[in-house]
Image (cartoon, rainbow, N blue to C red):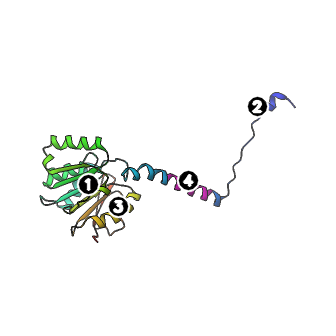
Amino acid sequence: MDLKAKETYEPEIVVNIQPARRERVKAQLLTAAKVKWQEQVFDRGMFAPNSPSPLSLIHHTLLVLKLDSASVLLDIGCGEARWLLEACAGYGCRGIGVDVDGELLETARIRAQERGLSHLMQLQQADIKHVEDFSEVSVVVFYGSREGCRGMAGFLSQKILRPGARLVSVQFTFPWEIQQTVSQDGFSAYIYQIPCR
């Protein structure tokens, strides 16, 4: 046998995993990824990465909501406060924004000042689970994830006590009956009445 030929020989590796085993491995990998994601996101008080809603969706949804100066809009994970800025500017309602990201909240504060809306907006750097008073909230905005919606459903139905309070969920649905859907630019907002306990 030629020694040079032996040195360059690379064996062909054939992976033959049975379909049932492949599905088990795939399920285990997905479970591990979800656990890791939950550790990184939920445990830090976040329900999804920051992803601003398109202004066209916000404007059309606010038209449907028919807010007024007596309305109080709570934006969970408000980020730069797009929903709050547009609602307060267009309808004179009050807005409460809660987010764990201080940098995004600082941007929101600057934009509120620039637009003369600071007196209508209250911005808090906090985990929503540690905010106590929801008594005045009439509309909640939540742009989370599928998992975030499941986790938030029970929380909202226990905390939001105002009869007739509504929820706007962007992109993902809650396990409640959808009252109305607004779609713009490939995004959807689902409007619900929050089932209070």
Comparing 50 with 121, the one in front is 121
Q: In this view, does 137 lie to the left or right of 172?
A: left
The spot of residue 19 in percent (x, y) is 64, 59
Mark closest to the chain's N terminus, 3 or 1: 1
What amino acid type should be assigned to the residue bearing mark 3? Met
Which stretch appears magenta? 22-33
Point out the frontmost of discs 4 and 3: 3
Assign a secondary structure to mark 3. Answer: helix
Res 190 quadrant in image: bottom left
Q: Name the residue under label 2.
A: 8
Mark 2: few/some/many CA within 10 Å (<14, 14-19, 20+): few
Which residue is label 3 attached to?
152
Cα separation, mark 2 vs mark 3, equals 59 Å
Q: For the point 30% across and 63% down, which residue is it?
A: 156
Q: Given the image, on which type of amino acid does mark 4 rest?
A: Leu
| Residue farthest bottom in this picture | 197
SS for callout 1: strand
Q: Earlier in the sequence, mark 2 or mark 1?
A: 2
Alpha carbon of mark 4 to alpha carbon of mark 2: how far? 35 Å
- Figure quadrant of residue 183: bottom left
Residue 193 in which image quadrant: bottom left
Q: Which of marks 4 and 3 is nearer the N terminus?
A: 4
Q: Name the residue under label 4.
A: 29
Other-residue count near label 4 (Cα within 10 Å), few / some / many at <14 / 14–19 / ≥20: few
Q: Name the residue under label 1.
A: 75
* Label located before the other in sequence (2 or 3): 2
Looking at this view, is 40 or 71 the one in front?
Answer: 40
